[in-house]
Amino acid sequence: MKYGHGHALAVTACFAAAAPTFADDSFRCGSKLIVTGMTQAEVLQLCGPPESSSEESLPVRSGSQVVGETRTYRWTYESYGATRVLVFDQDVLKSIK
């Protein structure tokens, strides 16, 4: 069975739409790649201090019982005209929004 160029483009477009994006897993800070799993010290070394930051204490629960506390840090960077918010749980980068 032969398909024309239009079919190939449609298939390519479907795969491109279904392909995962890595916007939440990494971003470029200058020529350096920042990825989830990095520590705060590693990000500071590669990007310098964030333009803004905040921290929050959150309860850690086991069922309905509070068994501890964790600290979440949000650092904001401007990169290539886009704002990136890095979310750390304790010292480890968990997400990039």
Image (spheres, rainbow, N blue to C red):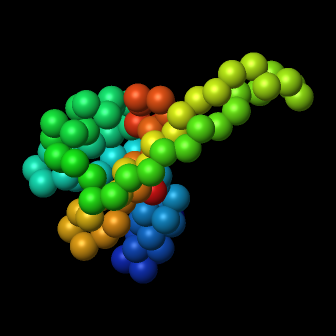
Residue 8 appears at what percent x and percent y?
A: 41, 70
Residue 27 appears at what percent x and percent y?
A: 29, 52
Residue 6 can be seen in this image: yes
Which residue is found at the position 23% from the left and 32% from the top? Answer: 42
In the image, residue 42 sits, relative to residue 62, either above or below, namely: below
Horizontal side of residue 93 vs 38, given as left or right:
right
Which residue is found at the position 31% from the left and 69% from the top? Answer: 82
In the image, residue 45 sits, relative to residue 21, either above or below, namely: above
In the image, residue 89 sits, relative to residue 74, either above or below, namely: above
Horizontal side of residue 56 vs 49, given as left or right:
right
Which corner quadrant holds the C terminus?
Answer: bottom left
Instruction: Count every numbered label the image shows and give the total.
Output: 0
* Of the pair 3 and 63, the residue shown nearer to us: 63
Residue 57 appears at what percent x and percent y?
A: 59, 38
Residue 23 can be seen in this image: no
Which residue is found at the position 16% from the left and 36% from the top? Answer: 45
| Residue farthest along the bottom direction in this orientation | 6
Kindly indicate the quadrant of the structure image that contains residue 32. top left
* Of the pair 6 and 77, the residue shown nearer to us: 77
Which residue is found at the position 44% from the left and 51% from the top? Answer: 54
Kindly indicate the quadrant of the structure image that contains residue 6. bottom left
* Of the pair 65 and 32, the residue shown nearer to us: 65
Horizontal side of residue 86 vs 56, given as left or right:
left
| Residue farthest along the right direction in this orientation | 64
In the image, residue 10 sits, relative to residue 56, either above or below, namely: below
Kindly indicate the quadrant of the structure image that contains residue 38. top left
